[in-house]
Amino acid sequence: MTHDLTLFSPETHRRFSESKRDTSAVRIRQHKAERLQEGDFWVACAPSMWKMKPAYFAITSIILACAPPLAPQQGPDRDFHPAVENPVYAIGQGPVVCLDEGHANFHTLEGRFRAFGELIRRDGYVVRAIRTKFDRQSLAECGILVISNALPNGNPWETYPYPTPSAFAREEIAATHDWVRAGGNLLLIADHMPCAGAAASLAAAFDVTFSDSFAVEGFGADSERDAAFAKPTIFRTADQTLRLHAIVNGRNAKEAVSSIRSFTGQAFRASAMAEPLMVLPSTFIALMPKKAWQFGRNTPRIPAGGWYQGAVMTVDSGRAAFFGEAAMFSAQVAGRSRLPIGMNAPEAEQNSQFVLNLMHWLSRVL
């Protein structure tokens, strides 16, 4: 997810997602002119403008500290530096990790995925952006390919057609699949709609079925939807929503993980060759709107209990990992009060170790 679910309503989240595309004065004024409707109002708050229904503002009981409206809403937490007590590699001596920045990605190394890059660099990995299309030549430079929230283009999400177009050309999908089969290692992360739809074709090449959805605790009436979104999603070994695996166990007891947090995201299914890591509780559903963050009483709901938010597999000589939520791999702050989103958030204290363990599995340390 791209924002802190414990604080804002779905309408606010939708505005939060849309405004992330461009926080310039021009774009904000365009949003204000194009989106202002009767019964809505705008608040120029820390650190940008959000459109909110009056009822949502009352329900959430949020006191929004106002600030200059042109500051970025959401960005990397540059003060987040979790310890890497036992690095696998000497600094700069590990495998090359390529982070995709060539597909209108919401997450970049100098942006919202900064903490991910800095964390694994301290573990010795060499981290660089890959901004070209995927082919045999570009992928040959990578030991691990990380793709997070690739998108069809940089346009506002509400302009995307339904179903969401693929972020990847057929040739790129074939090249990536062949590269993994030959020994490459893939980490594919695709958040809630429209990110899941944009990556669905690539996932399908590995018999993984992404749903262009929002995974959330089941609820009854529409009036209960906000509360469902506000509930943190915690995966625990104690209830087997976090499944035992080398990635969960780590190299030793000190690296073992017992609980991790995700931030909404999507639900997906996979073939029998996949090893589940994060399994959604039986009470979960997948909301299937036709536009991101636009829900109504007729929005389809699909039971998603037992579906995955994280799974891995061996593909011939290569390895692949699939995740349906992206913020859990990041550390971001939002607003003037620096609300934490990701590894730096409450109940996500073990997320950073989980990320390290996952990279160790992809690089064959585990």
Image (cartoon, rainbow, N blue to C red):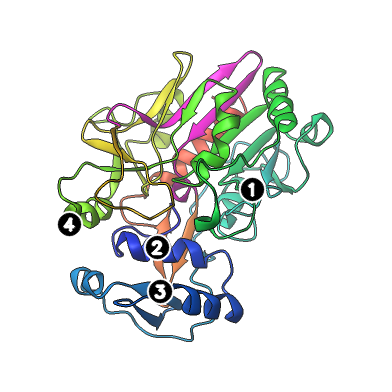
Q: Residue at x 49, y 51 (%)?
A: 83
Q: Residue at x 75, y 36 (%)?
A: 134
Residue 322 is covered by the magenta coloring = yes
Q: Residue at x 64, y 60 (%)?
A: 110
Residue 213 visible in the displayed image: yes
Tell me the tag on residue 223.
Answer: 4
At which x and y percent is residue 92? 72, 45
Q: Which residues are magenta?
A: 304-329
Mark 3 Cα shell of 10 Å, populated few (<14), some (14-19), many (≥20): many
User: Real-space Cα distance between discs 2 and 3?
Assistant: 18 Å
Q: Residue at x 44, y 13 (%)?
A: 272
Instruction: Give the mark nearest the N terminus, 2 or 3.
Output: 3
Residue that numbered label 1 is attached to: 121
Marks 2, 1: nearer the viewer: 2
Provide the secondary structure element on which disc 1 rests: helix
The kind of residue tagged 2 is Pro
Instruction: Give the mark nearest the N terminus, 1 or 3.
Output: 3
Residue that numbered label 2 is attached to: 340
Provide the secondary structure element on which disc 3 rests: strand
Instruction: Give the mark nearest the N terminus, 1 or 4.
Output: 1
Residue that numbered label 3 is attached to: 50
Residue 343 is covered by the magenta coloring = no
Instruction: Give the mark nearest the N terminus, 3 or 4.
Output: 3
